[in-house]
Image: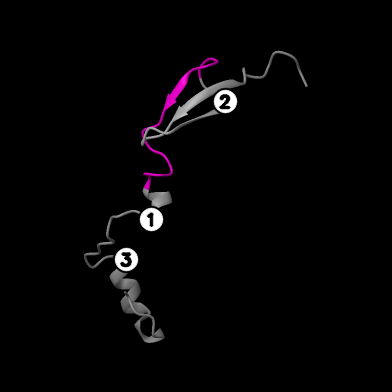
Amino acid sequence: MKADIHPDYHSIKVVMTDGTEYFTRSTYGKDGDTLQLDIDPKTHPAWTGGSAQLTDRGGRLSRFNKRFANFGITGK
């Protein structure tokens, strides 16, 4: 490997949205810095499944259900 081309890799503290924290190694900031998360796996809908309901107003979901209604698959 070439010398002096890689970023500094050091320890930082990561604080989750609920206040829990852990230490990890990263290239973020300086040694000992704190990374405060706004979105994390405990709160983001991609990981939690989301509380939002799927709403459709005659769009893609309705067209799909209408097109494949004869296959015996229900929309709910």
Q: Who comes first in sequence, dot 1 or dot 3? A: 1
Main SS of the magenta part reads: loop
Q: Amino acid at mark 3?
A: Arg
Residue at the spot 36% in from the left edge and 36% down from the top edge: 18
Question: How far separated are the C-alphas under marks 1 and 3?
Answer: 21 Å
- Residue 26 is marked as 2
Q: Secondary structure at mark 3?
A: helix
Q: As shown in the figure, which amino acid type bears the numbered disc 1?
A: Gly
Would you say 64 lies left or right of 1 here? left
Q: For the residue labelled by badge 2, is the local secondary structure a helix, a strand or a loop?
A: strand
Residue 50, compared with residue 17, is above or below; it is below
SS label for mark 1: loop
- In the picture, measured across the screen, residue 44 lies left or right of residue 25, that is left
- Numbered-mark total: 3
Q: Quadrant of residue 54?
A: bottom left
Which quarter of the rendering shows the C terminus?
A: bottom left
Separation (CA) of disc 2 from disc 1:
28 Å
State how far apart marks 3 and 2 are (Cα).
Answer: 42 Å
Answer yes or no: do the residues labelled 2 and 1 have beta carbons within 8 Å?
Answer: no
Residue at point 35%, 72% (across, down): 64
Foreground disc of the pair 1, 3: 1
Locate residue 36, reporting x and y percent. 40, 27
Q: Which residue is mark 3?
A: 60
Magenta segment, which residues? 29-44
Q: Residue at x 39, y 52 (%)?
A: 48
> Vertically, is 3 above or below 66?
above
Estimate the x, y position of residue 68 in percent, counting from the top left. 38, 79
Q: Which mark is residue 49?
A: 1
Q: Look at the image and say whether residue 48 sits in the magenta stretch.
A: no
Mark 2 or mark 1, which has the lower sequence index?
A: 2
